[in-house]
Image: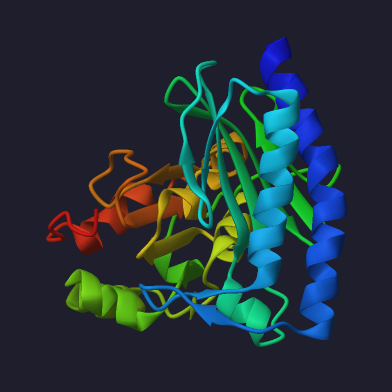
């Protein structure tokens, strides 16, 4: 691993632990909810977590760019850009459901080179850097080796998203072909794929900060991530993560999707 990537990656792993503890305190005692213009929820925990991470990055790596859900885009000059979702799964967070995580992705010259998904309420951290493998805490992880959709387990966010994307028919066909569909939305479905606890996660309605950190984790675990067209574009709303072995077959269920939601 290049020294400049390693330094950032290791520092981010250190930073995210105390920020996670602070966010967990908010989760346990509860907090007021605000509603953004797109009707997505935000809390003081989201804002505090992102600000703390941005402040640390700006202090140690002042030339790096930043993109976060709550405080937007800050261009940099180093070629590095940090992509942050302070709480991925705010709806779960506000309902007392522990399936939410803090996502920190590191991009260099347009390629994702490291990612961290920290789940304070679960006490787990999934993380990876290019060429170094993927881990949950200190344990190395690997995607599954199942090749048949009918015998696999597939995760998704929610039915409304497939309806909104205009691929409801394809999703229904998939539900017939794969009886084991589970609605683990947000980062958690992707983490399960990386650790071999399922074969694919399909989602719509995502932003760059929802998925950037997850690319290195899934791919370093031996899996594959792409848009529904098989390409990679963080600005698109559609994404599929898999063990790689069922990827092309799953893309066929959404082949009629017309790019939208940029």
Q: Could you say where residue 19 lies in the image, as x and y percent from the top left?
A: 81, 54
Horizontal relation, residue 49 to residue 73: left or right: right
Viewer-proximal residue among 196 and 192: 192
The relative height of residue 231 versus residue 243 in the rendered view (above or below) is above
Viewer-proximal residue among 82 and 35: 35
The relative height of residue 186 versus residue 116 in the rendered view (above or below) is below
Q: Could you say where residue 192 lies in the image, as x and y percent from the top left?
A: 62, 60
Q: Is residue 12 visible in the rendered structure shown here?
A: yes
Horizontal relation, residue 215 to residue 136: left or right: left
The relative height of residue 235 versus residue 29 in the rendered view (above or below) is above
The image's colour scheme reads rainbow
Judged from this view, the residue extending furthest toward the bottom is: 95
Horizontal relation, residue 42 to residue 260: left or right: right
Q: Quadrant of the N terminus?
A: top right
Q: Could you say where residue 147 lies in the image, as x and y percent from the top left?
A: 45, 53
Horizontal relation, residue 83 to residue 227: left or right: right
What residue sits 64% from the left and 61% below the top? Answer: 47
Viewer-proximal residue among 89 and 123: 89
């Amino acid at each position: 691993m290049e020294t400049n990537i390693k330094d950032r990656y290791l520092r981010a792993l250190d930073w995210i632990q105390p920020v996670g503890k602070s966010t967990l305190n908010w989760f346990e005692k509860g907090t007021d909810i605000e509603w953004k213009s797109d009707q997505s929820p935000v809390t003081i925990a989201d804002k505090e977590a992102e600000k703390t991470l941005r402040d640390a990055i700006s202090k140690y790596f002042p030339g790096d760019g930043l993109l976060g859900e709550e405080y937007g885009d800050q261009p940099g000059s180093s070629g590095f850009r940090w992509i942050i979702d302070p709480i991925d799964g705010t709806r779960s967070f506000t309902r007392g459901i522990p399936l939410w995580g803090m996502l920190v992705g590191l991009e260099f010259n347009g390629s994702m080179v490291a990612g961290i998904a920290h789940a304070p309420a679960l006490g787990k951290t999934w993380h990876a850097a290019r060429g170094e493998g993927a881990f949950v805490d200190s344990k190395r992880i690997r995607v599954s080796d199942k090749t048949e959709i009918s015998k696999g387990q597939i995760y998704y966010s929610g039915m409304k998203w497939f309806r909104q994307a205009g691929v409801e028919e394809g999703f229904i066909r998939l539900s017939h072909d794969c009886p084991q569909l589970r609605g683990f939305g947000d980062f958690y479905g992707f983490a399960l794929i990386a650790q071999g606890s399922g074969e694919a996660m399909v989602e719509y309605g995502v932003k760059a900060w929802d998925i950037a950190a997850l690319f290195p984790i899934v791919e370093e675990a031996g899996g594959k991530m792409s848009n529904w067209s098989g390409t990679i574009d963080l600005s698109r709303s559609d994404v599929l993560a898999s063990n790689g072995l069922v990827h092309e077959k799953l893309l066929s269920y959404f082949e009629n999707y017309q790019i939208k939601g940029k």
